[in-house]
Amino acid sequence: MMRILLSGFIAGALSVVIFHQGSVFLLHHIGNDIPAVVAVFGKAAAPFNMTPTKPLGVPAIASQCFWGGIWGVALAFILSRRLFPALAFGAIFGALALTVAALTLVPHLKGLPGWNGNIPWRGLLFNGAWGFGAALLLLRPLSLRA
């Protein structure tokens, strides 16, 4: 149980830095120069955002790592049941669960307007990359199948 908690948190937090922010980096530095990519994903901001977040004032990337760790624990618990292929499920879980939470729960908690009806392709891409990376990092400690 403790191994699942610890492995999930570490894998989720590291996946934010490596995979989520890695895809942000690629989209920002390469994709912003390709009109077709900008048409689908929009202009991507720079990775590793250090802007303080409310209410604690921690850098945005630190907040993302913390919440990535929390989601990583959830993913580790699901994958520890060995019902699904880890990498595919991780990518789908990240893309759908995290994006739905970002569109519904987070704005509600922050008192912001909710989903405007547009498909958030960029969120699906970044969160799917996070889920794939977290599952990849969990393969060894949880003895999962790819």
Image: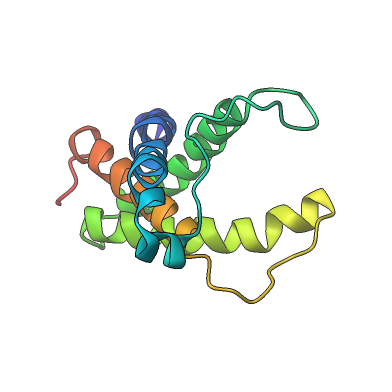
Colouring mode (rainbow / by chain / secondary structure / one colour): rainbow
Q: Residue at x 34, y 39 (%)?
A: 19
Q: Quadrant of the N terminus?
A: top left
Farthest residue toward the bottom?
117
Q: Is residue 97 above or below residue 47?
A: below
Q: Position of residue 73 (x, y in %)?
A: 45, 40
The reply, left or right, for residue 106 in relation to residue 65 is right
Q: 38 or 5: which is nearer to us?
A: 38
Q: Position of residue 139 (x, y in %)?
A: 20, 41
- Total marks shown come to 0
Quarter assignment of residue 116: bottom right
Farthest residue toward the right?
111
Q: Residue at x 64, y 77 (%)?
A: 117
Q: Position of residue 89 (x, y in %)?
A: 30, 60
Q: Residue at x 33, y 42 (%)?
A: 134
Q: Residue at x 79, y 52 (%)?
A: 109
Quarter assignment of residue 56: top right
Q: Position of residue 4 (x, y in %)?
A: 37, 36
Q: 146 or 125: which is nearer to us?
A: 125
Q: 122 or 40: which is nearer to us?
A: 40
